C-alpha cells in the first residue's frame, strides 16, 4: 500500500472514531426524565436502577399494586425524590394518557420513554386461544403505541428525546411454543423501526432492542399452558445457563449505552446475534431447524388452554441447582 493511500485510510478511520466519540458524548442522560413501563420487576427494574444511578429522574408503572409498591420502596431508598410510581395498564390508552400527564406534572418534562412492559405465554399453539394473542398484542404492540403517542409532544419539546422499545429475538425469528409472544414482538419490531424512520426529523432517536434469554427471574411470573410443569422446566433451565442466557445487569448497561448513542437496533446476546444473522441469510433453514426443535418440546395435553404461573408449575427438575442463577435473579429483581 502506498503511503498516500495509507494516509487516506488513517484519516478516514480517525474521522469515524471522532464521529463516534462526538455522537456518544453529545447526548447525556443526566438531569433528564424517563418513563419505564413494566419498571416494577425484571429488566425494567434493573434499567430503572441504572437510569437513577446516571442521574435520571424516573417514573415507573405496572399493573400489580403490590409489586409496584415494593419496587418503589426499594428504589426510593437509593434515590429519594427522584422516583415516581403509578399503576397503569399500558393496553388502555386513557390510562396511559393520564400517566404521562402525571409524570410531566411531577417532574416538569419527559425526555425518555422505555417501552418495556411484557407478557410471556408459553405452550403449544393448539393450547393458545384468541384471548392469548389479544393479550400479547395489547401489551407488546398497543402498549408501546399508546405510550409513544401520549409522550410524543413532550419528546418533541425535549429536542433530543429518546424512545427505547424492548422487543425480543422472538420478534425477529419464530420461537416455538411462544407464538402469541413472538407474533406481538414482531409487530413491536416493525412499529419501532417505522417510528425510527418518521421521528428522526424531530431529533427523536428510537432504539429497537431484541434481547435473547436473560437471567431476570421472569419465568416465575410467566404463564404456562398444556403440560405446564414440563414447559416451565425447559424454559427455566434454558434461561438459567450462562452459555444460553445473559446476565441482566450487563444487558441493561449495554441497552442504556445504545440509548445514549441513539443506536437504531441492538441484539443481545451472542447466541441471539448469531441466530438473527443466520435467519436473515438462511430463513428457510432457520424454519426447518425451529420445526425440528419444536418436535422435542412437550406435546399438547395437561391443563390444556388454562394458564398456570411459573410458581405454580414447579417440579424437581425446575428447582434443581441448574436453575439457581434464575432463582437468585428472581429475588433480586422483584420477581419472587
Image (cartoon, rainbow, N blue to C red):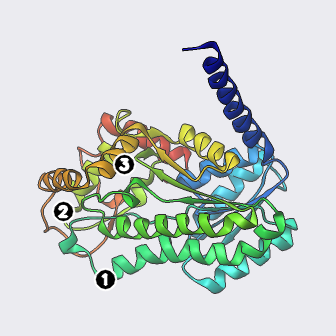
Disc 2 secondary structure class = loop
Q: Position of residue 199 (x, y in %)?
A: 67, 68
Q: Position of residue 270 (x, y in %)?
A: 41, 37
Q: Residue at x 74, y 32 (%)?
A: 18
> Which of these two is toward me, 283 or 214?
283
Q: Which residue is mark 1?
A: 130
Residue 9 to residue 112: above or below: above
Mark 2 to mark 1 CA distance (whole Å): 19 Å
Mark 3 to mark 1 CA distance (whole Å): 28 Å
Residue 309 quadrant: bottom left
Q: Which residue is mark 3?
A: 276
**Mark 3 or mark 1: whose residue is earlier in sequence:** 1
> Which of these two is toward me, 276 or 39?
276
Residue 238 quadrant: top left
Disc 3 secondary structure class = helix
- Does 142 sit left or right of 178 as displayed? right
**Mark 2 or mark 1: whose residue is earlier in sequence:** 1
Q: Which residue is mark 2?
A: 227
Q: Residue at x 23, y 45 (%)?
A: 316
Q: Position of residue 164 (x, y in %)?
A: 61, 58
Q: Quadrant of the N terminus?
A: top right
Q: Nearer the viewer, mark 3 or mark 2?
A: 3
Q: Residue at x 35, y 33 (%)?
A: 243
Q: Residue at x 57, y 40 (%)?
A: 249
**Mark 3 or mark 2: whose residue is earlier in sequence:** 2
Disc 1 secondary structure class = helix
Residue 100 shows which numbered tag? none
- Does 17 sit left or right of 82 as displayed? left
Q: Is residue 336 visible?
A: no
Amino acid at each position: 500500500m502506498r503511503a498516500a493511500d495509507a494516509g487516506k485510510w488513517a484519516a478516514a478511520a480517525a474521522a469515524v472514531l471522532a464521529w463516534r466519540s462526538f455522537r456518544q458524548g453529545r447526548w447525556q442522560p443526566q438531569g433528564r426524565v424517563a418513563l419505564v413501563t413494566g419498571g416494577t420487576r425484571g429488566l425494567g427494574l434493573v434499567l430503572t436502577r441504572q437510569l437513577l444511578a446516571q442521574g435520571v429522574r424516573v417514573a415507573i408503572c405496572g399493573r400489580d399494586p403490590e409489586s409496584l409498591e415494593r419496587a418503589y420502596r426499594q428504589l426510593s431508598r437509593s434515590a429519594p425524590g427522584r422516583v415516581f410510581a403509578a399503576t397503569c395498564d399500558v393496553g388502555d390508552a386513557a390510562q396511559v394518557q393520564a400517566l404521562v400527564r402525571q409524570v410531566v406534572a411531577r417532574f416538569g418534562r419527559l425526555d425518555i420513554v422505555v417501552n418495556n412492559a411484557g407478557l410471556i405465554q408459553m405452550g403449544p399453539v393448539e393450547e393458545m386461544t384468541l384471548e392469548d394473542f389479544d393479550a400479547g398484542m395489547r401489551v407488546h404492540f398497543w402498549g408501546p403505541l399508546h405510550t409513544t403517542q401520549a409522550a410524543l409532544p413532550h419528546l418533541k419539546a425535549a429536542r433530543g428525546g429518546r424512545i427505547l422499545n424492548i422487543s425480543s429475538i422472538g420478534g425477529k425469528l419464530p420461537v416455538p411454543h411462544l407464538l402469541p409472544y413472538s407474533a406481538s414482538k414482531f409487530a413491536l419490531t416493525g412499529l419501532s423501526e417505522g417510528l425510527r424512520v418518521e421521528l428522526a426529523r424531530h431529533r427523536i432517536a428510537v432504539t429497537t432492542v431484541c434481547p435473547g434469554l436473560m437471567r431476570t427471574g421472569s419465568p416465575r411470573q410467566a404463564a404456562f399452558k398444556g403440560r405446564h410443569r414440563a414447559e416451565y422446566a425447559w424454559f427455566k433451565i434454558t434461561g438459567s445457563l450462562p452459555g444460553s442466557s445473559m446476565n441482566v445487569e450487563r444487558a441493561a448497561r449495554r441497552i442504556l449505552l445504545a440509548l445514549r448513542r441513539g443506536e437504531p437496533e441492538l441484539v443481545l446476546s451472542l447466541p441471539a446475534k448469531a441466530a438473527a444473522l443466520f435467519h436473515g441469510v438462511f430463513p428457510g433453514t432457520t424454519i426447518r431447524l425451529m420445526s425440528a426443535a419444536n418436535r422435542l418440546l412437550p406435546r399438547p395435553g395437561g391443563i390444556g388452554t388454562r394458564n398456570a404461573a411459573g410458581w405454580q408449575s414447579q417440579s424437581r427438575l425446575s428447582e434443581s441447582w441448574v436453575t439457581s442463577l434464575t432463582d437468585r435473579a428472581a429475588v433480586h429483581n422483584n420477581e419472587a
